[in-house]
Image (tube, helix red, strand yellow):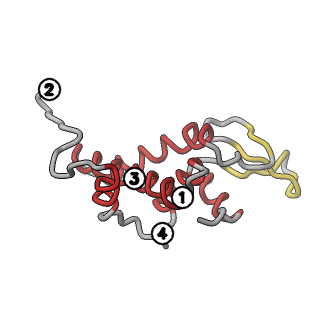
Amino acid sequence: MDRPTQEQIKEFWEWCGFKNKEWLNNPKHFYWETPFGNLFGELVPPIDLNNLFKYAEQPLVDHFIDTTSTEEEYRKAYYDFLCTWLRNYIWKEPHDPALALFWAIYSIIDKTTPYDNRAAPETLDSLMGIDSSKDLFPYSPEG
């Protein structure tokens, strides 16, 4: 996979809650404010696993909560997302798990990239030797 463009990186961090603000009302100088209200600096955070889990995890969970209506749908959406990350990592970015995670999340953000992973679980299950006819994550609301 290609490295993300500056525009894609900017769009990604804005989706995660970062805001680009003027420094002391000076239109020539900007800084990034984190979703927690802290000053980050002139550059957005680097794409690494620490920053992705720190800043992108909650918006991702919120996305799944907003787009699903049942526990089963939520689990399936999250499972599909994890399969996308693993597929990216195994086949497209074997040396950079952070970049694979970035692209998995970006596929959700980018409206022009369809988020359709219906074939991913079967592909990964067969790759990993898992019997997909069995429920890997049994869930019972009764406990």
Q: Is residue 58 above or below residue 106?
A: above
Per the image, label 2 sits on a secondary structure element best described as loop
Numbered label attached to residue 143: 2
Marks 1 and 4, the one that precedes in the sequence: 1
Q: Amino acid at mark 2?
A: Gly
Residue neighbourhood size for the residue with mark 2, other residues' Cα within 10 Å, grouped as few (<14), some (14–19), many (≥20): few
Query: Considering depth in this image, is 74 or 123 the residue closer to the camera?
Result: 123
Per the image, label 3 sits on a secondary structure element best described as helix
Could you say where residue 132 lies in the image, as x and y percent from the top left? 21, 52
Q: Is residue 49 left or right of residue 64?
A: right
Q: Is residue 60 above or below residue 39?
A: below
Q: Provide the residue designation for mark 1.
A: 103
Q: Provide the residue designation for mark 4.
A: 111
Q: Provide the residue designation for mark 3.
A: 81
Cα distance, mark 2 to mark 1? 36 Å
Q: Amino acid at mark 1?
A: Trp
Marks 2 and 4, the one that precedes in the sequence: 4
Residue at 70% across, 47% down: 46
